[in-house]
Image: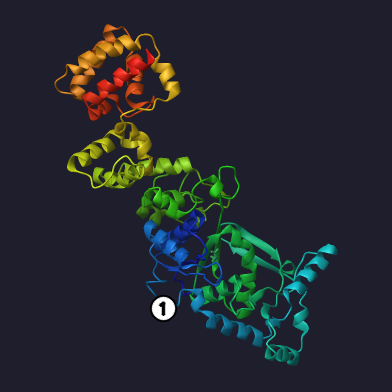
């Protein structure tokens, strides 16, 4: 451990997009570093050559930037402990593996994959847990030298102690004990010369002076292997905090079946990064049992690993939407317009370039729909009716509200009175509507709901008078007339 300095890292493998689980791990590391005045390091674990891609690397970098998780050391920014991509650190891993070999703590293994499969099957037949039986440990040095000189494919394995226990002192989960006999002599250098995850991560965490390893609970079972490596290397392990998995509502691991899972998708769907950060922070961490809205500064100030829970965190899409809506409220009208424009365009409701009049209209639209739009990409469903000549009626709403016997006569009077208005504004429309309601001895709702369905096609819409003003007199009259003719 570095001399008291907090140094944490996020170590993604660039083999896909940044999953919300990964982003949450990154965020917890970042918050912990910022809270402690420590360093946050980004390390790219790209030793899986076949699955690592440049595209995925870029997606991770973009997602981190979008979330505002800046790193003090890592790709782009550099640092004293680089390089920060594992593919560029191969010599270091080989050096450390050599050291273990020389000290008799690791050995070459020439077993082919067929032999290993056979071994495992035999063990299963005998009712034993499959594990490497250590046969290459017995090879004499001459024999090893000879086989290597011959160019026989080989890996390097770590000698696990065959007795005793390894205890992970986890900040989140308490002490977790592993029986050493369950662990086998795992591979540290593969036949292609690349290190395995467990070895590379240990060497890197040691060389980068990582003080706390904060990562997903799925890595807990790797931790005893890493601790044994530290032990044999004579280095004090970092402290560990394994954070709970993120689950879907059915309590299975969050996957595409449940909805969007990549940070990039939430960005495309137009979630606000500040809402995303706030939401992710609550996946497995809580300050108390009621506060839910935290600014970034608040989170930095209040975050602690002690308050991370050990039980799975359920990803609740509805709650994320709610939170997004809370943050939308703080955005300026200009910002909101900028956010919704691409979605209006994608839905084919507008085409750019927009003239001033259209821009003005959209500003008003955004004001009128207000908080109904929780996420910017929801705008088309709320405003589609403004852009069409033929409203699509929700059949149930039409049946319920437009087929009432009084609707025909009421609409007829309303059309006459509205058409007589010189100024078509809320202040002139409202008295006409309310006046008619009281003349006909109805409740406001009995008139307003049919009008709403006639104008928008649905039973739910933004404020009715505002909608009427924005639609304009001609459209309002045409829609009332059409509904009257079609349904009464
Ligand atoms: N590359 C590993 C992963 O993406 C990192 C695990 C760790 O933090 O040790 O799961």
Toward the viewer: 475 or 361?
475
Place of residue 299 in the rendered image (x, y in percent of width and height, measured from the top left): 40, 53
* Residue beneath the point at 72% across and 88% down: 147
Task: Give the image quarter of residue 106.
Answer: bottom right
* Residue beneath the point at 64% across and 70% down: 225
Q: How many marks?
A: 1
Place of residue 274 in the rendered image (x, y in percent of width and height, measured from the top left): 37, 51
Picture layout, residue 313 above or below residue 90 = above
Place of residue 129 in the rendered image (x, y in percent of width and height, measured from the top left): 78, 64
Picture layout, residue 144 above or below residue 336 = below
* Residue beneath the point at 59% across and 76% down: 195
Q: SS at mark 1?
A: loop
According to the picture, the residue beneath numbered tag 1 turns out to be 80
- Colouring of the image: rainbow
The residue carrying pointer 1 sits among few (fewer than 14), some (14 to 19) or many (20 or more) residues within 10 Å by Cα, namely few
* Relative side of 262 to 107, left or right: left
* Residue beneath the point at 34% across and 41% down: 348
As drawn, the residue found furthest toward the left would be 422
Toward the viewer: 411 or 199?
411
As drawn, the residue found furthest toward the right would be 126
Report the image quarter containing ligand 1. Answer: bottom right
* Relative side of 130 to 25, left or right: right
Place of residue 212 in the rendered image (x, y in percent of width and height, measured from the top left): 51, 66
Task: Give the image quarter of residue 401.
Answer: top left
Please indicate, yes or no, whether residue 1 appears anywhere in the rendered image: no
Please indicate, yes or no, whether residue 67 appears anywhere in the rendered image: yes
């Amino acid at each position: 451990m570095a001399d008291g300095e907090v140094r944490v890292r996020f170590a993604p493998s660039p083999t896909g997009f940044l999953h919300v689980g990964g982003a949450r791990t990154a965020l917890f590391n970042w918050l912990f570093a910022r809270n402690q005045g420590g360093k946050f390091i980004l390390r790219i674990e790209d030793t899986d050559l076949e699955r690592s891609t440049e595209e995925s690397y870029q997606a991770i970098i973009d997602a981190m930037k979008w979330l505002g998780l800046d790193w003090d050391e890592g790709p782009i920014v550099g640092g004293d402990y680089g390089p920060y991509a594992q593919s560029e650190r191969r010599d270091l891993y080989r050096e450390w593996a050599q050291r273990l070999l020389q000290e008799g703590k690791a050995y070459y293994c020439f077993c082919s994959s067929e032999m290993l499969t056979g071994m495992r099957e035999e063990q299963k037949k005998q009712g034993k847990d499959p594990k490497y039986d250590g046969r290459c440990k017995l090879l004499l040095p001459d024999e090893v030298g000879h086989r290597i000189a011959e160019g026989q494919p080989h890996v390097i394995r770590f000698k696990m102690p065959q007795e005793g226990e390894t205890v992970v002192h986890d900040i989140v989960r308490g002490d977790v004990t592993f029986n050493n006999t369950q662990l086998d002599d795992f591979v540290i250098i593969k036949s292609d010369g690349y290190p395995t995850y467990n070895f590379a991560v240990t060497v890197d965490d040691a060389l980068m002076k990582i003080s706390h390893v904060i990562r997903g609970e799925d890595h807990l079972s790797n931790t005893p292997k890493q601790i044994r490596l530290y032990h044999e290397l004579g280095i004090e392990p970092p402290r560990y905090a394994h954070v709970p998995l993120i689950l879907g509502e059915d309590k299975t691991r969050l996957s595409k079946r449940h909805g969007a899972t990549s940070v990039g998708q939430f960005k495309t769907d137009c979630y606000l990064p500040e809402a995303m950060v706030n939401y992710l922070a609550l996946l497995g961490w809580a300050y108390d049992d009621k506060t839910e809205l935290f600014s970034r500064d608040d989170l930095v100030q209040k975050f602690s690993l002690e308050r991370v829970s050990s039980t799975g965190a359920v990803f609740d899409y509805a709650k994320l939407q709610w939170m997004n809506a809370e943050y939308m409220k703080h955005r300026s009208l200009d910002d909101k317009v900028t956010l919704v424009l691409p979605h209006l365009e994608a839905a084919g409701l507008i085409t750019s370039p927009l003239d001033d009049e259209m821009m003005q209209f959209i500003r008003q639209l955004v004001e009128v729909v207000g908080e109904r739009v929780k996420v910017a990409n929801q705008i088309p469903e709320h405003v589609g009716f403004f852009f069409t000549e033929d409203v699509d009626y929700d059949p149930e709403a039409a049946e319920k509200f437009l087929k009432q016997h009084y609707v025909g006569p009421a609409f007829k009077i309303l059309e006459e009175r509205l058409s007589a208005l010189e100024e078509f504004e809320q202040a002139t429309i409202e008295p006409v509507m309310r006046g008619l309601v009281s003349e006909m001895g109805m409740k406001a709702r009995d008139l307003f709901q049919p009008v709403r369905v006639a104008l928008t096609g649905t039973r739910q819409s933004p404020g009715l008078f505002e909608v009427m003003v924005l639609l304009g007199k001609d459209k309002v009259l045409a829609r009332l007339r059409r509904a009257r003719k079609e349904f009464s």
